[in-house]
Image: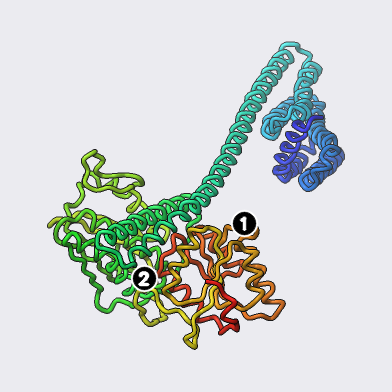
Amino acid sequence: MTPKKRRRIGEALRQRAGQWRTRIGFSLLIALAFWPMVGLRFALIWTVAYVLVQAGERFVTAVWTASPRLRRRLAPIGVSLVLSSNLLFAVFALRQAMTLETQGLVCAALLLSGALINGLMVTAGSRTITAVTLGPHLCALAALPVFMRIRYDQPLPALQLLVAGLLLAAATVAAVRGLSAALAQRRTAEATAVAARRLAEAASRAKSDFIANMSHEIRTPLNGVIGMARALSQADLPPREKEQSLLLVDSGEALRVLLNDMLDLSKIEAGKLTIDARPFALRPMLEGVTRLFEPAAAAKGLTIGLEIAPGLARTWIGDEARIRQILSNLVSNAVKFTSTGGLVVSAAPAGGSSGSAAFAGLRLAVVDTGPGIDPAQMDRLFQKFVQLDESSTRRHGGTGLGLALCADLTSLMKGEVQARRRPGGGMEFVVLLPLEISQTDFAETPTLKPAAPAVGDGDGAPLWVLATEDHPTNRKVLELLLEPTGVHCRFVENGQEAVEIWREQDWDIILMDVQMPVMDGLAATRAIRSEEAFGGRRRTPIIALTANALQHQQEEYAAAGMDDFVGKPVQPDRLYAALSRAAEQSAPSTRSADAAQA
């Protein structure tokens, strides 16, 4: 018996197993209803035999499901039990026909017809199960004209019953073929769907791997471009060169924002972007967003205002980074498309109803005095990669990702974003977020400026930093960023070197790249944490410094023992903030001044 035949037999046995209670119930009902016709003793013996066969079939099916290696041996046993079950049913019908009464012949014909119809439903396309299920009933049905010929001694009724039996048999065969074809088509469709799903999953994995690799490959040189441009912009340069360096920084930052938007959209489509809800202070976040776009607005002669409703809660529970990202996209669009006047960012409680549902939480809005959007194009506003002005003479560039990303991020936070044209001109974008007010009211801290702070330990002494970076350009960028802070820094090129240097002396902070030759950053971090635990050494704060910035990758860094994360391209304020946090948790280390190499 081929594996394909055994598989179909197994499917048929599982289908029959789902009806075993029904078959036993009908057998008891039939025996109870017809025992006066067939005799009490026959009815009892038949019922016991039928129940035992059903129990045996149920047991074989359970073993079949639990033990795949026994299926070769179980297949003949299962087929024999199915045959026995149908033979018993056919025997009961023949016993009714043997009474030679009209009522018995009719009941036998009805029972056999019902058995044929039921048998068609549980064959699962197995020819073997079909034969042992339908064969006994068709043979018994063909024998009924013999009993009629004996009872009435007239050939015509017997011939008519024979023809009816043959027609029923033909209809049964046609139904079996149709059902088999339908089952074959279903199996083909299921196999095609499974193959398509596997291909889609493989494509999704390949896409995720590609995005992760491209993210790293793009961020690494971009880190060098932005870092060196920023270092040049902070140097004492003539005005023309100063302007050129600032243009490089702005262009690099624009490319970084575009890269982040594309990665975020890819993560949303893959279902891998998660919302990190935690308490945050609202006013500093809003002020940071407006402050970020003040230079661009001032260059166009625009004003940016901030309005916060009186009595609005100071702290909320939500994903501050994603809310900041939504507002930044809206404000960026407002500055881009507004030529005169200005824009206002506002925050107020969200109450009442929005659309078809009641809404409570936080309402953020961006109102501008630009030309507005044609009402006919409102439906396309939040579609991906859509430019409302697609002409070759359009005044404003862009990828069409910003508003689509705003809509997706807002949806992830169970909120909604709305847009409407103001009667007096301009647009109003409203973001409604069902956030909860935080009971923790922490002090509002000003936004960190890119200017490098003096980073030191609690006694004011400079920190000793071990930096692990395999890319020479990134090492130079990191050196330029750390130079103004006054820290003592030593660079190594892989995780193995970092572990060996760490063993020689204590360090206040370790900056750890992730993808490196010889030993990667995760393995080096695990090695350091293991030796700290077993050797009793103090815990050294480790900051991941890498272009791999996806959420699940950051979770891997934390699981390996890293304390913080700074993505590439490195933004100075984030690097300095991470160093400050690490310095607060780092105990003063003991080391000699000549042990470090800048």
Find numbered disc 2 in the image and state the secondary structure of the residue it sits on.
loop
Q: Measured along the vertical axis of the image, is residue 584 above or below residue 130?
A: below
The amino acid on which the numbered mark 2 sits, given as a three-letter code, is Pro
Q: Position of residue 158 (x, y in %)?
A: 74, 15
Give 269 or 250, whichever is nearer the viewer. 250
Q: Residues within 10 Å of mark 2 (few under 14, many from 20)?
A: few
Answer with the quarter of the image where residue 107 lies: top right
Where residue 365 appears, x then y in whole percent?
26, 64
Along the horizontal axis of the image, is 275 left or right of 242? right
**Residue shown at 32%/44% (left/top)?**
386
Task: List x then y, in percent, for residue 144.
Answer: 77, 21
Q: Residue at x 57, y 69 (%)?
A: 562
Is residue 373 left or right of 506 when viewed as pictured?
left
Q: In the depicted view, which residue is nearer to us: 207 or 215? A: 215
Q: Is residue 550 visible?
A: no
Q: Which residue is mark 2?
A: 450
Left or right of 481: which side holds 403? left
From the top left corner, tell me how far across and down residue 188 is, in percent. 62, 31
Residue occupied by mark 1: 517
Residue in the foreground of this view, choosing between 422 and 156: 422
Q: From what the image shows, is residue 479 above or below residue 549? A: below
Q: From this viewpoint, which residue is outermost toward the top?
A: 155
| Placement of 565 over or under 11, stated as above or below | below
Q: Can residue 546 be seen in the rendering of this structure?
A: yes
